[in-house]
């Protein structure tokens, strides 16, 4: 199966660490990417090739990928990080997105 | 500045056709794979189709295979999506997105996104 599974929602207090997971069959054997989408805006790439940050993305965003799970970690979460987050991977000439996780910063 | 601008969306009845356009600027268009990604109202992202820089490798989601056709004209820095036999479930905001390099392969992601064009399918 090429499905990617994310928790529908994650809550975190300001300044704390947010962890968003993405599960898929042998996902660790593929590259994972993560996108942030705020209401009414287009998605923005925040992590690619498992761990790399595009220019302009704050250092508090980091990623890892091993086994069947890719993880997006946001350290010192800020109110501006409240958004939907999507994982993405490639599988046999197709691109797959996870269902998305709504991050709430309480 | 790298930019993508979609157009061609609109209202269409089920079973009819529509053609979407995406104009790229600020980068060497033929050096990058391109994609269409859609998002139904209140729903998540769904990849629709991708094409490498040379139009040699093309992929489609199962949900659109046989109905949608992706193509590109590198001389015009343009990407297209021909959508036939449209269904109510195809109604969404359609994004054009740029890949990180020429090929369409396992390291793929989308590093630039347009603002999208809305497709409404209704009788």
Image (cartoon, rainbow, N blue to C red):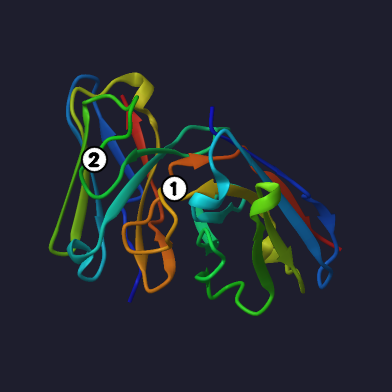
Cα–Cα gap, marks 2 and 1: 13 Å
Q: Residue at the spot x=65%, y=63% of the render?
A: B71
Q: In the picture provided, is A91 more to the left or to the right than A70? A: right
> Residue at label 2?
A52
At mark 1, the secondary structure is: loop
At mark 2, the secondary structure is: loop
Q: Residue at the spot x=38%, y=29% of the render?
A: A82
> x and y percent of residue B69 in the render?
67, 70
Q: Which mark is residue B110?
A: 1
Q: Could one spot residue B79 in this view of the protein?
A: yes
Q: Quadrant of residue B103?
A: bottom left
> x and y percent of residue B34 in the render?
53, 54
Q: Quadrant of the C terminus of chain A?
A: top left
Q: Could one spot residue B60 in this view of the protein?
A: no
Chain under numbered label 1: B
Name the foreground residue: B29 vs A88: B29
Q: Residue at the spot x=70%, y=45% of the render?
A: B117
Chain under numbered label 2: A
């Amino acid at each position: 199966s090429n499905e990617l599974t994310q928790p529908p929602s994650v809550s975190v207090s300001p300044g704390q660490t947010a962890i968003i997971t993405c599960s898929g069959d042998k996902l660790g054997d593929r590259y994972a990417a993560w996108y942030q989408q705020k209401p009414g805006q287009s998605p923005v790439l925040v992590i690619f090739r498992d761990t790399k940050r595009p220019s302009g993305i704050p250092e508090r965003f980091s990623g890892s990928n091993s086994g069947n799970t890719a993880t997006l970690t946001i350290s010192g979460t800020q109110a501006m990080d409240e958004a939907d987050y999507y994982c993405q991977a490639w599988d046999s000439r197709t691109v797959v997105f996870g269902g998305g996780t709504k991050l709430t910063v309480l | 500045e790298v930019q993508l601008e979609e157009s061609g969306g609109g209202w269409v009845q089920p079973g009819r056709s529509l053609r979407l356009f995406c104009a790229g600027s600020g980068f060497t268009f033929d050096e990058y794979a391109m994609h269409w990604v859609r998002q139904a109202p209140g729903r998540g992202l769904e990849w629709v189709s991708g094409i490498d820089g040379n139009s040699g490798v093309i992929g489609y989601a199962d949900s659109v295979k046989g109905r949608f056709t992706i193509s590109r004209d590198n001389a015009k820095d343009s990407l297209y999506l021909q959508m036939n036999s449209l269904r109510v479930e195809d109604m969404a905001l359609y994004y054009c997105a740029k890949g990180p390099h020429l090929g369409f392969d396992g390291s793929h992601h989308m590093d630039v996104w347009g603002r999208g064009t809305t497709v409404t399918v209704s009788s």
